[in-house]
Amino acid sequence: MSIRKKIEIDETKVEFKASAAIPRIYRLKFGRDIYKDLSLLEKALSDSKEDDSTLDMFSLELFENIAFIMAKHANPDIEDTPEEWLDNFNTFSIYQILPELIELWGLNTQTDIEAKKNFARQSVK
């Protein structure tokens, strides 16, 4: 099961997709754990304010990679690297997009947990 969401970036609606495949796709592409990276980003986001622009380069790169993976998962026809994909946009605010991606990921995780609970209940019967 997956969840999709369209988010406006630079006046363009971009579709993102979250599913159980994302952690594996992210790990294979970037060699990192998306759960840890999203946790780091959530903390960095809560510690900063949009007008301060205090996110470090590492956090920005994590955001770009996560956004790219979720966009590529929704549309396999987009470019093959984050750099090529990002080149389609003018500068945009991470502070507007990241919370929506985090929300999308949270909805996906919540849906997976509910599905597992329902499956466990059906197996017991």
Image (cartoon, helix red, strand yellow):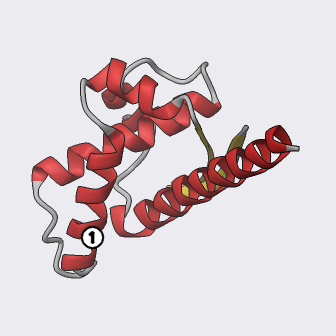
Q: Is residue 104 left or right of residue 81?
A: right
Query: Which residue is disc 1 drawn over?
Result: 45
Q: Position of residue 52 (x, y in %)?
A: 16, 80
Q: Residues within 10 Å of mark 1 (few under 14, many from 20)?
A: some
> Can residue 125 be seen at all in this image of the molecule?
yes
Q: Position of residue 94 (x, y in %)?
A: 35, 61
Residue found at x 33% / y 43%: 64
Observer-nearest of 94 and 109? 109
Residue 51 sits in which quadrant? bottom left
Observer-nearest of 84 and 117? 117
Q: Amino acid at mark 1?
A: Leu
Counting every numbered tag in the picture gives 1
Residue found at x 43% / y 17%: 80
Residue found at x 53% / y 63%: 103
> Can residue 11 be seen at all in this image of the molecule?
no
Residue found at x 41% / y 61%: 98
Q: Position of residue 36 (x, y in %)?
A: 27, 48
Instruction: Give the quadrant of the C terminus.
Output: top right
